[in-house]
Every structure is written in structure tokens, then in C-alpha cells.
Image (tube, coloured by chain):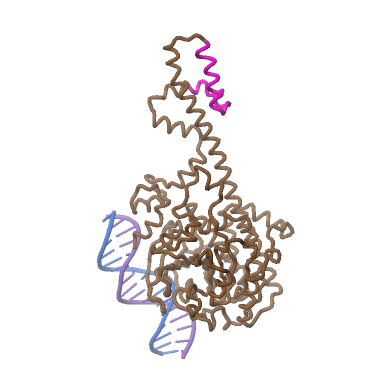
Chain colours: A brown, B purple, C blue
DNA sequence: CGGGTTTGACCAGCGC
DNA sequence: GCGCTGGTCAAACCCG
């Protein structure tokens, strides 16, 4: 089991170490510098650093390097190495130097070439850094827009939403929306009329700030909900209903400022369903298993993990295999990390946090706030991911279901979903083409498209979710529209009415989603 | 030996 | 009040 956790991080490590070394890597150990950090350093480093590397490679060239520096001022300005050579040619043959002198000059020529190459690499790094910044900015924007949409919809919902007491009606509406909703009918977060001030403010926040905002937003929306088991589905969902109950003093203590002690409610959770033979999916974080239980209705044990990347990190996750299809691994996350994360983990954390915030922003008035609704833009060429939201449970959960086939018909997916859940697509096309084509791009262990189409091996949520966000320019609009639809949809206000009420997960005809009261589905 | 997993025990919420 | 269940704890154990 312990090897599973270590295997999670091999893609982040330097690649040469064993399991324990990988742990050290993630803790920022001095000996095994994570590859990702190396990349960052490479993006941000200076030419001098690379020169130092060259010096390490050729320490005996130090004098020559110094000689190069003597002409470096002109060389540096001439970014084209060819220009440098031209200048040298003017000096050497035409000046009538002796052959020995010329031979003495040759190392300098090579060094100048190297210098030019370094400059070229520097420029390239600058471009890459800009690209990375742009990606990060876009991601921040997306999150900000998501948050804005959530806030707006939450406000609207609080103001005038009428409750749909009939869960089945909600389901029908959900289906209609799923089949018929178009982006044009949904909230366009790109619309400048939508809270420009707030939007600007939100868009300007960094990733971490976004996380913080979302966390605060989420905490603000924490509600006191009587713990009630309304779902009859097995396994994870039942556990999820009680997860985060205030009975864990240590957890509350660990949450500290993040969660008021008098608030008995828990955080929203984000579940991930993925096909994987591996016991765990790689999410970029380091986890320690602290318990295992046999859940009712599921022969597969449920494992409990907590984040160990920092002391007191409140993030926990549950891992359990689907009873009906043991190739499906369900991982449920809760909480926000209170420490820096590796890039991959950051993407995952942000995504789950956004999803959680999305849930909570719409579930503040009642625990069924997000009972059902749907969105399925017909403009989406690939419906690779479906998201199902549900707040019918005592605390809302959003599940990314990555188990569906890419070729799966959305209608079929609809029929597979046993509960009136909110569904919307998350296009998972892959990494940005500019990254794919770039030599500095290190493809993940499993590129997202492979993850989508592949039902085996180690599915990486980070890769998949990140790819979902990064790959499709329509994603922002689509997601916002989905959120909009979700928030606007009629919701069940009856405490006994929930998506799974009377529709136990794992019903015949819904083999793909046997245990989800809340499900993101992936195609 | 340190860090992780295993596993039985314990606690608290919930339903009957 | 009692039993069931989920979640957590912590001692024992394992492993590199």
C-alpha cells in the first residue's frame, strides 16, 4: 500500500529515486529536487546560471569563458550567432594573423557560438515563461470567472428561486436542459455586464488567492444541515454523507482558522471516478493512509487518507472501488490545502476547490440547493466529461466521472445516470497544442487524451482535469453556462427529496454510476 | 530508525 | 436506549 503513494509521485520526482526519495522530493528535500521545480528554475533562471552549468561541464574553459565575456557586450546584443561569427571573421583571417593565433582564437569562436546558443535558449525560455504565465493567467481567469458566476448565481438563487418539490420533475428538467440547453441561454461569464468590478477583482487574483477566495466563499456558505441519510446508494456516497461531521476534534483543530468551530457543517467534496488498476490515482499530493473500513453495500474497503505534505493540512480523501465495477476507482476529496502544492497538485486542488465552491455557492439556502439541473451544450464536439452535482446529501458533492467512453452518447449517459443530477460536459481534449509542440513541454505520464480513452493504468486526475481546463477555449463559457443552469434550475426543497431518493445508485440500467449521488462523468 | 500501513477499538450521529 | 454505521485514533507491524 505504501508503494501506491510513492508511485503517485514518481512523475513529479527526479526519476531516479526510490519511493522514499520521492517522498523527500515532495517535501522539498535538498537532495532530490523535483523535476517540476527544476523546470520552474529553468524558466526563471538567468543566463549566468546556465553559464555556470557550462562551467561545470567544462571547468577548464573558465579562462575562455572570461574571454568571451570580454566581447560579451557586443555578442549579447547580437542575438543571432551568425552575426557573431561574421564579426569574428572580420578579425581573424583578414587581419593577417598567424595560423597559431587563429588556432588560438578557435576556442573563442566555439565559446561565442555557445554564448549565442545560450542567448537563444534564453530567449526561448523567455517565450516559454511567457507561455506559462499566460496559461497560469488563463487558469486564474477561468477560476475567477467561475467564482463570479457562482456568486452571481448564488445571489440570484437566494433572492428568488422557487423550489421544485418534486425531485423527479427536477430530473426531467435536468434531462431537458441537458438535451437542449445551449450556451447562449446560460450565463456568459465573459459578459462584461456581469459584475465588472468584482470580475476584475477576481480575475486579478493569483491562483493561491483564488483558492483562498474560494475557501472563504465556501466557508461563508457553510450551513448547518442536519445529518440525514437520505441516499440509499452504497459505498462512498453513504460515507460521504457523514464525512466531515464535527466529531473529529483533530480535524477541526487542524482546520483552525479555516473553519469556525461552531459551524457543524462540513465542506463540499469533490469526488473523482476513474478507471484505474492502480490503487490510487495520482493527484500530485502526498497522502497518508489513516484508516480503512468496510463500507456497507460494497465489498471493497474504503481507505482514508490525509494529506501529509504539511503538518495540519486538513485535506483528506477517501478511496474506494466501485462495487459493480472494480476497475472504477472513486476518490473523494475534502478541504483545502494549507501549504504550497506542486503544479500538478495545484491544478487539482484548484479544480476541486472550484468545484466545491461551485457546489457550496448554490447550496447555501438548503441542503438540496443543487438537487438537479443540467446543461449540455450542443456545441460541444466532445463530451468527454460530465459533471454531476448534488446537494441532496447532507453536504454537497461534485464528482468527476472519468470512466465514460469518449464515444458515449450523451443521451446514453443520461440514461445511465440514476439520479436527477446536474450534468455538464468538461471537454478533455488534451494539453494545449502550443505546449504539445513545444520541446520544453514534458508530457505527463498519461496525456489526457489517453486517460480519456484508456481505462487502465494510472489515471491522473491532475492531468485530466488540467487538460479539461486548458484545452478548450469554450470551456469557460461552457462551465459557466453549466453553473448558471445548475443554479437556476428548480431545486428540491423537500428534505426527503433527493436525487437518489427512491433511485438507489447502482440500479439496473445505470451500471456506470452505481454509487454516485453526485457525479461528474467523463467520456 | 523513521515513516508509512494495518487493524481493532473507540466515538458520535442517526434510525428504529 | 440500542444497534448500525461512518470516521478516526493509535498501537502494532512493516519496510527501506
A402 in magenta: no
Looking at the picture, how far across and down is residue A241, in whole percent? 49, 75
Outermost residue, right side:
A193
Q: Is the magenta stretch mostly helix, strand or loop?
A: helix
Point 71% across, 72% down: residue: A159
Tell me where the magenta segment starts and ends, as one range: A68-94
Looking at the image, which is closer to me, A46 or A107? Answer: A107
Point 49% across, 72% down: residue: A512
Looking at the picture, how far across and down is residue A82, in whole percent? 54, 25
Looking at the image, which is closer to me, A235 or A509? Answer: A509
Give the answer, above or below, for where A154 lies relative to A49: below
Looking at the picture, how far across and down is residue A335, in whole percent? 50, 64
Looking at the picture, how far across and down is residue A223, in whole percent? 58, 73
Q: In which quarter of the image is residue A501?
A: bottom right
Point 52% across, 59% down: residue: A465
Kindly tell me whether residue A262 is visible in this rendering: no
Q: How many marks?
A: 0
Kindly tell me whether residue A97 is visible in this rendering: yes
Point 56% across, 29% down: residue: A79
Give the answer, above or below, for where A104 lies relative to A146: above
Looking at the image, which is closer to me, A21 or A16? Answer: A16
Can you say which quadrant of the picture contains the N terminus of chain A? bottom left
Q: Quadrant of residue A412?
A: bottom right
Amino acid at each position: 500500500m505504501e508503494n501506491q503513494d510513492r508511485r503517485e509521485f514518481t512523475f513529479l520526482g527526479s526519476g531516479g529515486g526510490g519511493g522514499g526519495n520521492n517522498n523527500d522530493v515532495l517535501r522539498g528535500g535538498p537532495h532530490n529536487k523535483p523535476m517540476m521545480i527544476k523546470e520552474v528554475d529553468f524558466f526563471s533562471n538567468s543566463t549566468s546560471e546556465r553559464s555556470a552549468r557550462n562551467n561545470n561541464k567544462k571547468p577548464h574553459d573558465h579562462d575562455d569563458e572570461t574571454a568571451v565575456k570580454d566581447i560579451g557586450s557586443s555578442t549579447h546584443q547580437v542575438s543571432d550567432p551568425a552575426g557573431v561569427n561574421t564579426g569574428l571573421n572580420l578579425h581573424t583571417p583578414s587581419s593577417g594573423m598567424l595560423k597559431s593565433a587563429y588556432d588560438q582564437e578557435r576556442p573563442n569562436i566555439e565559446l561565442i557560438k555557445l554564448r549565442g546558443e545560450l542567448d537563444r535558449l534564453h530567449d526561448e525560455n523567455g517565450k516559454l515563461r511567457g507561455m506559462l504565465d499566460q496559461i497560469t493567467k488563463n487558469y486564474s481567469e477561468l477560476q475567477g470567472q467561475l467564482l463570479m458566476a457562482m456568486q452571481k448565481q448564488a445571489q440570484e438563487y437566494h433572492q428568488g428561486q422557487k423550489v421544485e418539490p418534486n425531485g423527479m420533475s427536477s430530473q426531467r428538467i435536468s434531462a431537458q436542459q441537458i438535451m437542449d440547453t445551449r450556451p447562449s441561454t446560460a450565463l456568459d461569464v465573459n459578459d462584461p455586464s456581469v459584475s465588472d468590478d468584482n470580475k476584475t477583482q477576481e480575475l486579478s487574483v493569483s491562483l493561491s488567492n483564488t483558492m483562498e477566495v474560494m475557501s472563504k466563499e465556501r466557508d461563508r456558505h457553510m450551513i448547518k444541515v442536519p445529518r440525514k441519510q437520505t441516499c440509499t446508494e452504497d459505498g462512498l456516497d453513504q460515507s460521504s454523507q457523514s464525512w466531515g461531521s464535527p466529531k473529529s476534534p483533530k480535524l477541526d483543530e487542524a482546520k483552525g482558522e479555516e473553519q469556525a468551530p461552531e459551524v457543524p457543517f462540513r465542506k463540499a467534496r469533490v469526488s473523482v471516478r476513474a478507471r484505474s488498476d492502480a490503487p490510487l490515482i495520482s493527484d500530485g499530493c502526498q497522502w497518508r493512509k489513516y484508516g480503512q473500513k468496510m463500507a456497507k453495500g460494497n465489498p471493497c474497503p474504503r481507505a482514508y487518507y490525509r494529506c501529509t505534505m504539511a503538518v495540519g493540512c486538513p485535506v483528506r480523501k477517501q478511496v474506494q472501488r466501485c462495487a459493480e465495477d472494480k476497475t472504477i476507482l472513486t476518490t473523494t476529496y475534502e478541504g483545502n490545502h494549507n501549504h504550497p502544492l506542486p503544479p500538478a497538485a495545484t491544478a487539482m486542488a484548484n479544480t476541486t476547490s472550484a468545484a466545491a465552491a461551485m457546489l457550496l455557492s448554490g447550496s447555501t439556502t438548503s441542503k438540496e440547493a443543487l438537487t438537479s439541473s443540467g446543461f449540455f451544450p450542443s456545441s460541444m464536439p466532445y463530451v468527454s466529461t460530465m459533471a454531476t452535482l448534488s446537494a441532496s446529501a447532507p453536504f454537497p458533492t461534485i464528482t468527476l466521472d472519468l470512466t465514460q467512453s469518449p464515444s458515449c452518447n450523451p443521451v446514453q449517459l443520461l440514461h445511465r445516470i440514476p439520479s436527477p443530477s446536474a450534468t455538464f460536459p468538461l471537454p478533455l481534449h488534451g494539453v494545449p497544442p502550443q505546449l504539445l509542440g513545444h520541446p520544453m513541454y514534458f508530457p505527463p505520464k498519461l496525456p489526457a487524451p489517453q486517460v480519456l480513452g484508456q481505462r487502465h493504468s494510472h489515471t491522473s486526475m491532475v492531468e485530466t482535469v488540467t487538460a479539461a481546463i486548458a484545452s478548450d477555449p469554450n470551456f469557460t463559457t461552457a462551465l459557466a453556462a453549466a453553473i448558471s443552469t445548475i443554479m437556476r434550475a428548480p431545486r428540491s426543497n423537500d428534505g426527503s427529496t433527493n436525487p437518489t431518493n427512491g433511485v438507489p445508485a447502482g440500479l439496473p440500467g445505470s451500471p456506470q454510476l452505481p454509487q454516485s449521488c453526485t457525479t461528474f462523468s467523463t467520456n
